[in-house]
Amino acid sequence: METRETDVAIIGAGSAGLNARREVLRQGGEPILIESGPYGTTCARVGCMPSKLLIAAADVAHELSRANAFGLELADGFRVDGRAVMDRVRRERDRFVGFVVESTEAIPSEQWLRGRARFLGPTTLQVDDHTVVESKTVIVAAGSHPFVPPPFNKMREHMMVSDDVFELDDLPGSIAVIGTGIIALELGQAFHRLGVKVAFFNPFDELGPFTDPEVKQVVKAVLSAELTINLGSTVIDAEVVTDGIRLRWADADGGEHEDVFERVLVAAGRRPNLAGLDLEKTGLSLNEKGLPPLNPRTTQASDLPIFFAGDIDGHLPLLHEAADDGRIAGSNAALYPNVVAHIRRVPLAVAFTDPQMAMIGARYADLPEGGFAVGHVSFENQGRARVMGRNQGIGRIYADTSCCRLIGAEIFGPNVEHMAHLLAWSVQQGMSVQAALSMPFYHPVLEEGMRTAIRDLAANLQVLGGCPAEDLVETPGM
Ligand SMILES: Cc1cc2nc3c(=O)[nH]c(=O)nc-3n(C[C@H](O)[C@H](O)[C@H](O)COP(=O)(O)OP(=O)(O)OC[C@H]3O[C@@H](n4cnc5c(N)ncnc54)[C@H](O)[C@@H]3O)c2cc1C
């Protein structure tokens, strides 16, 4: 067994680990990056990028399928070439992964180790059965994995998780999607729009990330009109048959049904990769999920020289959060014991469904009772949305009643990824409702819908009289 000594041992060469390594070097520390799986990161290999590539194909198919609403006739309709779709997904995905692999492989050999790391003590790791690493500090950036609930956990080889989707050679004829969270909806809707028969199942009455009851209601109405969604359903049995998997389920009223699906995609959430890390050997007290107390502003676990970064911390499993965690952990681990609390960005999450979903700042469920006002917009009659024939959705924007500052929003609407950024930047800058309305708005754009909600907010906050902004005046035809 070889022994190596270093300043910072980093477990996981994903987005969090790679950013942590860069920061350790920037601070003058010596890192060792330990990776047990393939290089390339979850985001590039099986996450953000390939899922958006599949959705891009589905978007084009969807636009073609509604061409006649605009008076356009496709002479012979169009045909989805499933092999070509999946081929492009992989080709472009491999290009993104290639860049990451190339830069990871360029790391000098004294700064990396291949193998699975586990703790022997708070700052001692064993990597496979070949190396012991003695480090001054450790960063745990081991990521997450898809959660597979019963009865599917007994038939892993017959069902898919999101990692497997991008290896399909062709589009299947039918897919049962277990789950209705962001990953399930993004992938399931994309398959549906590419002509695959898709049915969603969830034992709970949850659809997407929203917590605002009014947004949830619109999401349910809009998505249920397009997709087959079985909320409140219980899968009783899953059986492998010659042409796929036979599912038997009870609907929300207890009625029993069965159908055969060529594929089952289990997208029922992700869990931190804690198994096998032997965290109990660090002396950290662990909660029922197996996680120690973590400070998101320092990423430090309790008061030990151990830091957690990325999906492993079970909080906001998003690429930019993983990168930020990595930078904070890298800096604090390199400068330990001088641990510094960093200011975190305003939370921002986007789901690339259609309509898109965005969560910005404080969630409705976390707003202080009696301390907030809501501004509302429906995209049904929003000018630009109607022009595009994509007039579905709702936006709800929240402000603090004591200071009239924007604090959060939940939005379901066309292309809201862009206004979600404007809102997140406004919330982070502590912008007031009046200041937001004094900003320029072009016409006709979807952001005018956001302005409608902020105007409504201004009216509800009764700041109309005190606000000099011209924009508070209703413009005809908006
Ligand atoms: C289908 C899908 C779509 C997504 N879409 C988006 C999106 O649109 N936007 C967005 O912001 N986020 C998206 N995400 C989330 C995003 O991909 C993750 O938040 C991000 O990749 C997490 O990075 P990480 O560094 O924490 O984990 P990873 O990149 O998974 O890195 C963890 C690494 O640790 C290694 N490892 C684990 N255990 C050990 C061990 N014991 N020893 C050594 N190595 C170990 C693993 O092999 C892995 O390489 C998506 C995720 C999925 C699955």
Image (cartoon, rainbow, N blue to C red):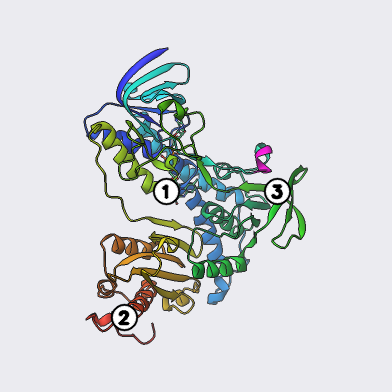
Question: Which residue is at the far bottom?
Answer: 476
Q: Is residue 241 left or right of residue 125?
A: right
Closer mark to the observer between disc 3 and disc 2: 2
Say if residue 95 shows up in the picture.
Answer: no
| Location of residue 46 with respect to 27 vertically, above or below | below
Mark earlier in primary sequence (1, 3): 3
Location of mark 3 (residue): 262
* Residue at (60, 57) in percent of width and height: 194
Q: In the rendered view, would you say 42 is above or below 304?
A: below
Residue 227 is inside the magenta segment: no
Q: Residue 55, percent across and down? A: 51, 55
Q: Is mark 1 within 8 Å of ligand 1?
A: yes
Magenta stretch contains residue 154: yes
Cβ atoms under marks 1 and 3 closer than 8 Å? no
Amino acid type, residue under disc 1 in the picture: Leu
Local crowd size for mark 2, using a 10 Å CA cut-off: few (<14), some (14–19), many (≥20): few
What's the residue type where badge 2 is placed? Gln
Query: Which quadrant, please, contains the C terminus?
Result: bottom left
The residue segment tinted magenta is 150-155
Q: Counting residues from the N terminus, which is met first, the one under dot 3 or under dot 2? A: 3
Q: Which mark is residue 318?
A: 1
